[in-house]
Amino acid sequence: MGQRVALITGSGKRIGAATAAKLLADGWFVFLHVRNSVEDAQKFLESYQRENGTPASAEIVRADLDSDEELEQLIQHVLAHDSVKINGGLHGLIHNASIYNSMNFEEVSLEELRLNNRIHVEVPFLLTQRLVEPLKTANGCVVGLIDTSLGRAWKGLSHYTSSKAALRQLMMNLAGDLAPDVRVNCVAPGAIMAAEWEAEHFASVLEKIPLGRAGEVEDVANAISFLLDSPYLSGQVIEVDGGWSVAP
Ligand SMILES: NC(=O)c1ccc[n+]([C@@H]2O[C@H](COP(=O)([O-])OP(=O)(O)OC[C@H]3O[C@@H](n4cnc5c(N)ncnc54)[C@H](OP(=O)(O)O)[C@@H]3O)[C@@H](O)[C@H]2O)c1
């Protein structure tokens, strides 16, 4: 078998970059998709080369996923890429790109609501649909990054949690639609890395977590890698949350 190939959206830093690091260590070719974090992605690849004495088998691809034109360019780039043609398709598609802003329900604009749905639902739908042929050829696996909010009321986040719930359902539905050729799963991180605005809120969440601490980005990367490497797992959600989802 040739080299396995993955596209990870929003992988210039944080959980996306940790996932890229795990897949590179496991011998994958990785498309590191970024929007603004071009420099972070370049530094990540430079440090990989320093540490491993060999260039990473990866390519940085830039696209604002809110732009139809740039999304199309990303799709065309992947479809035409030698790594996909030579290695028998696309083995992994990780829907990681995300936005996360808290605001009063009354103040959520239609624009904000649509942007959440665009990034968390529309883009994963379109990317999976347009890349389905190379995914089928490779018997690939799609992984959606959701969260642990399903069925809960997270203050000031209804625009975000509702779009992540839709992503979860999209992934579950596609696990049926795309079987038996393509597997589709989700990883639901708990409190892993705080957003800049939520330091106080993040600290209060940690108090409720049975394991008593935040998770590491590598914990999420390992769960994604496990799903990619598990040929009989489809339609699953792995909660990487230190037991938060079962806390009293
Ligand atoms: N961090 C946590 O503790 C946590 C908890 C629960 C769930 N999750 C989920 O796990 C995943 C990774 O979390 P994270 O905190 O590492 O993510 P993040 O930093 O919030 O976002 C990842 C990337 O998404 C990209 N992105 C946002 N809008 C975009 C757009 N219009 N076009 C293209 N890219 C765009 C950004 O890329 P650029 O920087 O290149 O602009 C950003 O670096 C997310 O899906 C998140 O919802 C994380």
Image (cartoon, rainbow, N blue to C red):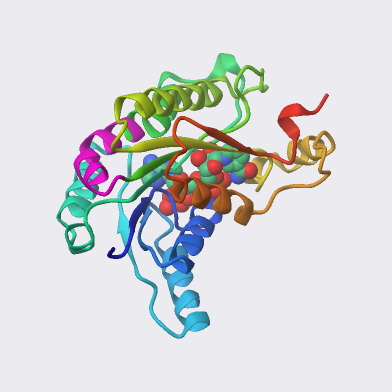
Relative to 244, is 91 above or below?
below
Q: Is residue 129 magenta?
A: yes
Please tell me which residue is depicted at 48% across the width and 75% down the height of the picture. Answer: 48
User: Could you say where residue 75 lies in the image, as x and y percent from the top left?
Assistant: 22, 46
Please tell me which residue is depicted at 23% across the width and 37% down the height of the picture. Answer: 68
Relative to 125, is 44 above or below?
below
**How many labels, in total?**
0
Please tell me which residue is depicted at 60% across the width and 24% down the height of the picture. Answer: 157
Please tell me which residue is depicted at 49% across the width and 83% down the height of the picture. Answer: 50
Horizontal side of residue 201 vs 121, given as left or right? right
Question: Where on the picture, by quarter, is residue 6?
Answer: bottom left
Which residue appears farthest toward the top when viewing the image?
A: 106
Classify the position of the N terminus by image quarter. Answer: bottom left
Horizontal side of residue 182 vs 82, given as left or right? right
Question: Where on the picture, by quarter, is residue 123?
Answer: top left
Q: Is residue 179 magenta?
A: no
User: Could you say where residue 88 lies in the image, as x and y percent from the top left?
Assistant: 21, 56
Segment colored magenta: 124-139
